[in-house]
Amino acid sequence: MAAEILQPSDKAIANAVSILEDGGLVAIPTETVYGLACDAANSDAVARLYAAKGRPSFNPLIAHITDLPAAKREGTFSTTAEELAKAHWPGPLTLVVPVADAHSVCDLARAGLDSIALRSPSHPVARELLKAFSRPLVAPSANPSGKISPTRADHVLTDMGDAVDLILDGGPCKAGIESTIISCLTNPPTLLRPGSFDASAFQAGSTDEAAPSSPGQLARHYAPEARLRLNASAPETGEAYLAFGHSTGTLNLSPSGDLIEAASNLFAMMRELDSKHDRIAVAPIPSEGIGAAINDRLARAAKRD
Ligand code: TXA
Ligand code: MG
């Protein structure tokens, strides 16, 4: 069923907050493009969001917050990072900083990185919603993978109407180009993605120490210490077993064989098994839908060099 488009009002914001609290997906206007928002702390909601985007891998998401104090609960700000935020927030500038110890944004939303991308949007509807929700919202551009970013509510309806629970209409986006992403993991900070904010003063950052592919690869992904064996129909002696579907395991990603539930459990279960075992066998995961992203993540985790 196609999502409802609501004009912004107190009632619409309250409606959006209750959908987000229930783990739903709400398309929101920002000054750059429309974003597909969900509760950044809810890995189940984030798994549904990745499934709706239909990407074959977990791209780390930008956490949207109201202001610098809220950002500092999620990330660790150097003096330089803090100066950039103070000078340019709210606005179309995303800062990548080390994740703070007491962060609330889930592992899945950060694709297992130990850094986090943060931005304080200036669009009044996005700000009102963030204030009312009072916690970070992750929001990738509200387009299916491979399509261009939406700048009007009806674009979202056409492209993702069946996948979202509600679309807040904030009119056409002013910028129409995504936020500029600057990494504060380097000193001086480097440009990871050019965007609406003029970043000609910054040097382009290498997007990966080894092989540039996506900005998300800059920081280290969580890599297990344990040796991983994939597509294992059963564990061997000495292996912990990460099961999927109707089989018994040390842990089970989803006893009912639900791929979204499996994605939501993936990072936490890998960490738990890794803390107690040296060898982990992982059940075969179907590569359909979000299963492709799960397998992509598992393949990276299994690679040791
Ligand atoms: O303007 C925007 O930024 C829009 C609106 C909705 O806010 N959002 C957006 O999100 O463009 P998305 O998911 O389409 O792009 C997020 C980018 C990705 O290229 C991702 O790799 C990068 O941010 N990113 C997220 N976390 C990162 C991290 N820890 N390190 C490096 N790059 C990161
Ligand atoms: Mg995008």
Image (cartoon, grey):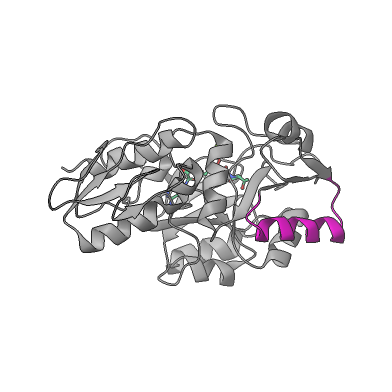
> In front here: 274 or 145?
274
* 302 relative to 163 in the view: left or right: left
Q: Nearer the viewer, residue 88 or 144?
A: 144
Magenta span of residues: 6-24
Q: What secondary structure predominates along the stretch shown in magenta?
A: helix
The residue depicted at 69 percent of the width and 64 percent of the height is 133
Q: In this image, 58 relative to 199: left or right?
A: left
Residue 161: quadrant of the picture: top right
Q: Is residue 112 visible?
A: no
In this view, 292 is above or below 106 = above
- In the rendered image, residue 9 lying in the magenta stretch gets the answer yes
User: Quadrant location of the C terminus?
Assistant: top left
**Location of residue 272 (image quadrant):** bottom left
Query: Split into 4 quadrants, where in the image is the N terminus?
Result: top right
Residue 273 visible here: yes
Q: Position of residue 49 (x, y in %)?
A: 57, 44
Asked if residue 39 lies in the magenta stretch, the reply is: no
| Along the line of sight, the residue nearer the viewer: 134 or 173 | 134
Residue 182 horizontal/vertical position (percent): 47, 50
Q: Residue at x 66, y 68 (%)?
A: 134
Work out whether 304 lies above or below 15. above
The location of residue 27, given as percent across then percent down, is 70, 45
> Residue visible at 66% across and 38% down?
163
